[in-house]
């Protein structure tokens, strides 16, 4: 990985996505290279991730217990496993794990599809802080793509859990990566307890279809 002032690596193509939204091998190669810094400090990544999450969405702190150690370990283990497995051709097992995690987070913590907006932002910001000088705008785009893919599968699990508890509930406006909101997902601001949507925010995810 070159420095920000150098010529840097060959840029991966991030303008066209496969039909399933999965990050391309070129994108995952960029992400995997940056994971060397992240993998060396997994606890730090989790700490920074939750710090950003609770800064943007203070109300989310009450969803988790006082001791976050186990939660942080699971978060980093799942992320690093996702990065490793996405470099292979078979991701069915990983997709199932993410699906189950999404359902579990809804049942145990009340994490709804709309909350993944903040989760995706917190993740990319945490990687930026831990990776340090190796981080760049291009690498940010690669991590955004990965975050969107991970969140899409977790949202699918959450939506199934919601449907089981309340079949009439509809949260179509917050379907990350689905057709209803494929054009753009806004950047979040600290949200009050009413869970109102953030206003006048810039775009994070753009439709690359």
Image (tube, rainbow, N blue to C red):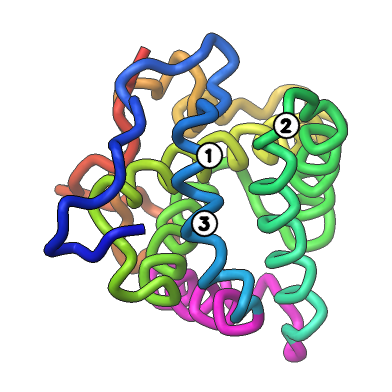
Q: Can residue 128 be seen in this view?
A: yes
Closer to us: 123 or 155 = 123
Expressed as whole percent of the image width and height from the top left, the position of residue 155 reads 65, 37
- Decide if residue 202 is on the left or right side of residue 42: left
Marks 3 and 1 in Cβ contact (< 8 Å): no
Q: Which residue is label 3 attached to?
A: 119
- Decide if residue 170 is on the left or right side of residue 167: left
Q: In which quarter of the image is the C terminus?
A: top left
Q: Residue at x 40, y 42 (%)?
A: 142
Mark 3 → mark 2, Cα distance in angstroms? 25 Å
Counting the numbered discs, the total is 3
Expressed as whole percent of the image width and height from the top left, the position of residue 184 reads 30, 30
SS at circle 2? loop
Q: Which residue is label 2 attached to?
A: 88
- Crowd rating for badge 1 (residues with CA inside 10 Å; few <14, some 14–19, many 20+): many
**Which label is found at residue 28?**
1
Mark 3 → mark 1, Cα distance in angstroms? 20 Å
Height in image: 169 above or below 127? above
**Magenta part, dominant SS:** helix
């Amino acid at each position: 990985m070159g420095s920000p002032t150098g010529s840097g690596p060959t840029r991966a193509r991030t303008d066209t996505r496969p039909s399933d939204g999965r990050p391309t091998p070129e994108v995952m190669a960029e992400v995997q290279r940056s994971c060397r810094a992240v993998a060396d400090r997994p606890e730090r990544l989790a700490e920074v991730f939750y710090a950003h999450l609770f800064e943007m969405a203070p109300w989310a702190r009450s969803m988790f217990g006082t001791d976050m150690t186990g939660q942080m370990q699971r978060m980093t283990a799942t992320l690093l496993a996702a990065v490793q497995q996405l470099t292979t051709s078979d991701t069915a097992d990983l997709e199932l794990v993410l699906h189950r995690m999404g359902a579990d987070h809804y049942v145990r913590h009340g994490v709804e599809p709309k909350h993944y907006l903040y989760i995706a932002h917190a993740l990319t910001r945490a990687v930026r802080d831990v990776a340090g000088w190796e981080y760049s705008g291009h690498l940010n785009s690669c991590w955004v793509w990965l975050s969107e893919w991970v969140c899409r599968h977790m949202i699918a699990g959450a939506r199934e859990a919601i449907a089981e508890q309340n079949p009439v509930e509809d949260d179509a406006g917050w379907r990350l990566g689905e057709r209803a909101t494929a054009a753009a997902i806004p950047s979040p601001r600290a949200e009050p307890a009413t869970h109102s949507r953030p206003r006048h925010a810039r775009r994070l995810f753009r439709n690359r279809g």
